[in-house]
Amino acid sequence: MRIVDLSMSVRDHFRWKPEITVKGNKSAGDQFRVTRLGTTCHGFSHVDAQAHFIADGPTIEATPLDQVVGAARVFDLSAIGPDTEITPEILAAADPGGKQGDIILLATRWDTRRDHGTRAFWTEAPWLNRAAAEWLWTLRPRALAVDFPQDYPIRLLLDGIEVPDAEHVTHDVLLRNGVTLIEYVVNTAALTQSRVFLSAAPLKIENADGAPARIYAIEGLPL
């Protein structure tokens, strides 16, 4: 059995600007050292609830754990170049096969080519077109995990540009239909198997539309 950490470190970031403060110093005689974190629920590695995109949709504490924990099939998309439109044909060629209800992990290894703390990670990334999102929906996954900003308009948000909902294709096609989105995983280059056990359990934040998660894969389990 081998555990592979797929989570971004929470640190200073130009996009999300987390507030991280530390109170207390053991070396100075304080009883405890206590860190306080303030950040968006949609920064770093996280899970989207349907409420993120659908009016009055279920919030994150209502997401069943078996939706985001279980068998996953890994699509090796590492040959894809920057700013590439990912089509159904590309996905079909990378599909290792599996079962209906698998979690699908799209592994481009994008974090090995661009640092997520830079604009280039967001503006030069590959992205899924609508037909690709619709093709993924035909596989009936319980969740989709991605290691790149998968909808083209995500890059536009850096400059405050908003587009119609339909252009956020994985949100409109998959999340709307109950496929949970697990966003911004990293370190997929460390995976050696095309079928893994994936855990992306989000923090149980009441009435939230998403939540951070410590995401990891386990290789070597019978699945």
Image: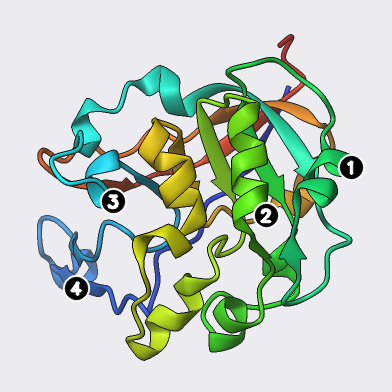
Task: Judge the density around disc 4: few (<14), some (14-19), many (≥20) Cα neighbours within 10 Å.
Answer: few
Query: Is 174 positioned to the left or the right of 43 in the image?
Result: right
State the separation of the CA atoms marked 1 and 3. 30 Å
Residue drawn 33% across the image and 75% down it: 16
Specify the farthest residue to the bottom: 159
Q: Secondary structure at mark 1?
A: helix
**Quadrant where the N terminus lies?**
top right
Nearer the camera: disc 4 or disc 3 = 3
Q: Are marks 4 and 3 in contact (CB under 8 Å)?
A: no
Q: Which residue is tagged 3?
A: 53
Up the image or down, 186 lies above or below 182; here it is below
Between discs 2 and 3, the one toward the N terminus: 3
State the separation of the CA atoms marked 4 and 2. 27 Å
Q: Are marks 1 and 4 in contact (CB under 8 Å)?
A: no
Task: Judge the density around disc 3: few (<14), some (14-19), many (≥20) Cα neighbours within 10 Å.
Answer: some
State the separation of the CA atoms marked 4 and 3. 31 Å
Residue drawn 75% across the image and 75% down it: 113
Residue drawn 28% across the image and 51% down it: 53
The amino acid type of the residue labelled 1 equals: Ala
Q: Which residue is tagged 1?
A: 93
State the separation of the CA atoms marked 2 and 1. 22 Å
Up the image or down, 102 lies above or below 190; here it is above
State the separation of the CA atoms marked 2 and 3. 27 Å
Q: Are marks 4 and 2 in contact (CB under 8 Å)?
A: no
Q: Which residue is tagged 2?
A: 187
The amino acid type of the residue labelled 4 equals: Thr
Nearer the camera: disc 1 or disc 4 = 1
Q: Which mark is residue 21?
A: 4
